[in-house]
Image: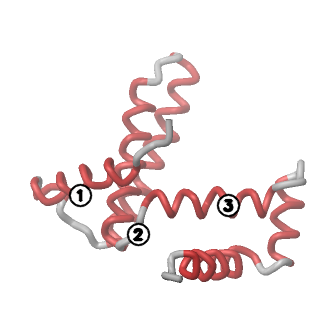
């Protein structure tokens, strides 16, 4: 079953409008919240190794995903498309490699992320043009 990020994003954006605690849509401030929640995720994961209890880990993953969807909304990005772009980038970058550092090095020689994202976005814009 394919996740429906668009539907979840709509719920996140609706909650942001309804609850003033979540209403700050400044992308930089949201990014700082992602950083904080990612740190909490790491801490809870370290504790979970000792207890085998993933309850808090699941909560922190939810926080990170929630904030990522909030960031998409704040920037006008479609979450499905962002994830699809990342999947395609990872295929291009890591396919045929068994060593991550070698893949990263070769990727940079080929132009890196900036070139990939520019080409990807250019191609996806042309695919959506009426014929």
In the image, taking residue 86 as reference, residue 95 lies left or right, namely right
How many angstroms separate mark 2 from mark 3 (CA)?
Answer: 17 Å
In the image, taking residue 12 as reference, residue 45 lies left or right, namely right
The residue at the point 17 percent across, 52 percent down is: 15
Q: Position of residue 127 (x, y in %)?
A: 57, 76
Q: Is residue 39 above or below residue 73?
A: above
Label 1: state its secondary structure.
helix
Q: Residues within 10 Å of mark 3 (few under 14, many from 20)?
A: few
Mark 2 or 3 closer to N-term? 2
Front residue (pair 34, 46)? 34
The residue at the point 89 percent across, 53 percent down is: 97
Displayed quadrant of residue 18: bottom left
Mark 1 or 2 closer to N-term? 1
The residue beneath circle 1 is: 13
How many angstroms separate mark 1 from mark 3 (CA)?
Answer: 27 Å
The residue beneath circle 3 is: 88
Front residue (pair 102, 47)? 102
Label 2: state its secondary structure.
loop
Label 3: state its secondary structure.
helix
Front residue (pair 129, 6)? 129
Mark 1 or 3 closer to N-term? 1
- Way the structure is coloured: secondary structure
Mark 1 near mark 3, Cβ–Cβ under 8 Å?
Answer: no
The circle drawn on residue 77 is: 2
């Amino acid at each position: 079953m394919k996740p429906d990020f668009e539907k979840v994003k709509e719920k996140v954006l609706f909650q942001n409008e309804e609850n003033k605690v979540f209403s700050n849509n400044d992308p930089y401030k949201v990014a700082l919240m992602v950083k904080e929640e990612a740190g909490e995720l790491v801490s809870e994961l370290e504790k979970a190794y000792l207890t085998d209890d993933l309850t808090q880990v699941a909560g922190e993953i939810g926080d990170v995903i929630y904030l990522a969807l909030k960031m998409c909304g704040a920037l006008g990005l479609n979450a499905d498309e962002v994830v699809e772009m990342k999947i395609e980038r990872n295929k291009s970058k890591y396919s045929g490699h068994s060593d991550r550092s070698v893949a990263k090095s070769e990727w940079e020689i080929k132009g890196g992320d900036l070139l990939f994202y520019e080409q990807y976005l250019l191609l996806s814009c042309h695919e959506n043009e009426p014929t």
